[in-house]
Every structure is written in C-alpha cells, then in structure tokens.
Amino acid sequence: MNTIGQLGMDYDGNTADLDAALRIEESFDIIGRNLYIAGRRAKLYFIDGFAKDDIMEKIMEFIMGLEQGALDGVQDAGQFADRFVTYVETDVVNDAQKIVTGVLSGTIALLVEGYGDAIMIDARTYPSRGVEEPEDDRVLRGSRDGFVETLVHNTALIRRRIRDPALTMEILQIGAKSKTDVVVCYMENTVDKKLLDKLLKKLKSIEINTLTMSQESLAECLVRSQWFNPFPKVRYTERPDAATACVIEGSILLLVDNSPSVMILPTSLFDFVQDTNDYYFPPVVGTYLRLVRIAVFFLTMFLTPVWYLLILNPGWVPDWLTFIQVSEPNGVPIIAQLLLIEFVIDGLKLASLNTPSVLSNSFSVVGALILGDFAVQARWFVPEVVLYMAFVAIATFTSPSFELGYAMKLFRVVLLILTALFGVWGFAGGVVLLLLTVAFTKTAAGKSYLYPLIPFNGRALLRMFVRRPISRRNTR
C-alpha cells in the first residue's frame, strides 16, 4: 500500500491519492462511487460486502437531493457531517493513511469538493454466524449464547451484562498489514493498574505483520517464549457469562476480531479448576463438582504412571490391591502398550476433527469399541491397559482447558518413560521435574503460576476449592 500523508484542499489530488492507495482499479470489491452534492463533486469509498446497502441508499438519497447553494456557509467537512449526514456514527479525518485503513476495515469515506477532510461513516456490517452456545463449554443450566467472530457483537454481549460506566473497552490495532482490532476490556475500579499499564505497553510495542492465528498469535507475542513449557499462560472462554464474571473480579479481557475466544489475564494454575457449571448450581453442589474435577485431574496425571510402577514392583502391591496386576500378560511390553495407546488416542482425536458430523457417532463406535476389542483379542494389549487408558482419555475432558489437558498428557508420557528407564527413581525424578516446571512458570503478568499457594494466600486458596455464594462474592 502506498504511503500518503494529509489531505489537502485539492479535490482531484485527494481522490487520485486515495484511488492509488486503495488500488481501486485492481480490486473489484473496493468501490469508488462518484456523485454530485448540491452542484459539487463528491466521492464515496467503501468495500462491497461491508456497507449496509439500505442505510447508504437513504443517506445518498438525502445528500444527492440537496439543492444548489445548500452548502453555502458550510465551512468544513465537520459542519457538513453535522448538518447533512443522517447516520449516527460519523467522524472527520484528515490523515489519508487512517482513511485508507478505515475503508479497508469497512468504514465508508466521503470526500466533498471544497473540503480538506474526509467524512467517515461507520455504516458497516460484517458477515457473521448467529450467537449460539459454544461447543466446548456447555452448561446444564444458564445462558445459551456465546461469542462470535465479530468484535462489536462480542463487546455488546459483555455490555449487556455489565451496565456500569466503569466497564472500559480500549481498542487497538495490531499488525502492520492486517491491522487487527484488539479490545482491552476491564473494570476501571477493580483492575490492577500496574498490570494494565504493562499490558497496554506490550500491546502497543508488538511488531508483527499479521495476527495469523488470531488470539494464539497475540498470546505468543505477549508471553515470553518457552517452547519446552506446555503449561498455558492464558485462559480462554467463549462464554459471555464466564468472561463477565472474570472482568468483574478484576481480570483483563482481550478480545480479538475474527475470533470467538476471549483471553483472560492474568491466569494461574488454580484458575483452571473452576468451571462455569460450578456457578449454575447451589454452592454445596458447585463445591462438590469442583472437588471431583480436581480429583480426576490428579488421577489423569498419575493413574497410569503409578500403576505401571506397581507392575514393575509387584512386591509393593498389598493384598487388597492384587486385582490391579496383569492377569494375562502378552509379549508386548506394558510401557509400549501404554505409549502406543496414548498416541492412538490423539490420532483418533485428530481424525474426529475431520470426520463429517453425520458420521461422527459411527466413527466413535468403531474407534472405541471395535478397535479396542480386537486389539485385546489379537493380544496387542492387555485388558487392564485398555481400561486405564480409556478412563484417562475420557476423564481428560473434565478439564475446562484443552491446553492444560495436553500439558498434563505430555508430563504423563515423560513420567512413564522415566519410570520405564529408571524405576522408582525415574518416577520420583519425573514428579520433581513436573513440580519445578510449574514452580518456575510465570503468568503473563510475570507473577507466580501457583498463586494463591505461592505466595500463600489462605483465603484466596480456600475460594479455589470451595464455591462461595454469589452474593458474598459480589459484595466483597
């Protein structure tokens, strides 16, 4: 895109510069519409598909119907917009580069002969799907709406729930070429101002051409790169009610255009034990569900490594646990069976993503029942391995975060390999490696990933395990 400066009073020069910068002749969907307003030349710039046809038709009908001399006494574009542009969202811009960016974003630019500014009419609409419940974050009770790919719709879903002027939404543009809209959402009276200033400074200093992968690209720009550390530094949600609850409690939301996921900052490890369902049930039920989630979380992490360690050391198994021993061993090593099923499960997950929805149920039956049953009959796997790995695969979905689930999976595989190589010392070393990795992980704000355990905050830690009544949480 050509670099141009400020508009001047030369109408022909202004339109020639914008025509060249927008490359109207080369792109069929960038429209430059010539018209006359009260005897003066004028030109509209807009993207075909972004402009609201019915609204623009009414605006053009009005301004093109102005009689000769109607603009006498109208000194500048600002006065013209105040008197004759009937749409509510208008602005006057002199910077040609901002005009080009605005047009490419969907705003309509109007140039009128005799004025050195462009009138920007924000009568745009983006193609979008309907607001519906997210597939990966469902609730038994509660609202059934979810974020979509259109930024203004997402901010409206939050505004609908928080009718307080303290709710602030600052918009930035990131990406030298994409100029992706990013909204920083927070409550002015509860947000951590130091964290907010640090985050805004980071966002404004990002140098990148495009946010190719939307919020993931943004997260990698904000968080220091640690390729060896799989633990997520950012929490995501597609639910407006969950995002609203977080921002009320002082968190910062990052909304990225073209993405239905909202980023929640800051995030520690214990934040992942909470789920939206906890708050749509009475406190005692919500607490029970949370404790079950935590217990299953530890089981998915340590069940197969501990079982394999006991298989390697049968003398450690007490009489009341003898049923965990392999009753019919085969020629395939247990560790090979465990690792193979780990990979097979991930392969089936990847395959299910590309499976047409009409075939997904059939695919699940084939993958889960027929393959598992024939694998046991063919003596590839022992039934105990299939049973424990099936439990781990299903129980992983109790975690509301896919990223945390895969982090635990990778460390589970490391535990299995170390246990197979070095026995009990390998298992102990794997646990120490896990603890050290978590301990040295920092949040996006640079704070401890284990807060409120480190640094210790007993009251906050208790709230992570026990769901408090909503009234107490809102009046603290």
Image (cartoon, rainbow, N blue to C red):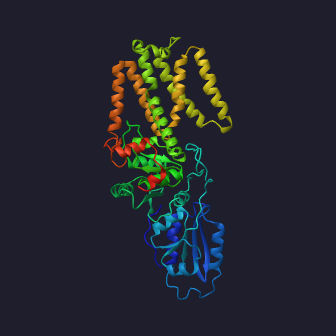
Above or below, 25 against 278 in this view is below
Give left or right: position of 6 versus 146. left
Vertical side of 83 occupied by 179: above or below = above
* Whether residue 210 can be seen here: no
How far across and down, in percent of the image, does residue 224 sit? 35, 45
> Quadrant location of residue 173?
bottom left
Say which residue appears at 45% left-offset and 58% top-offset. Answer: 185
Q: Quadrant of the C terminus?
A: bottom left
Picture coordinates of residue 340, whole percent (x, y): 50, 23
Residue under the point 47% across and 19% down:
336
Does residue 192 appear to the left or right of 92 in the view shown?
A: left
Classify 297 as above or below 341. below
Q: As rendered, which of 108 and 241 lies closer to the eye? A: 241
Q: Report whether residue 468 is seen.
A: yes
Give residue 318's quadrant in the image.
Answer: top left
Number of dots carrying numbers: 0
Q: Residue at x 35, y 49 (%)?
A: 445
Q: Could you tell me residue 266's position as x and y percent?
A: 39, 49
Residue at 58% x, 60% y: name it.
27
Residue 324 x/y as whole percent: 49, 17
Front residue of this view, candidates 262 and 219: 262
In the rendered image, the residue lying farthest to the right is: 358
Q: Is residue 215 above or below residue 432?
A: below
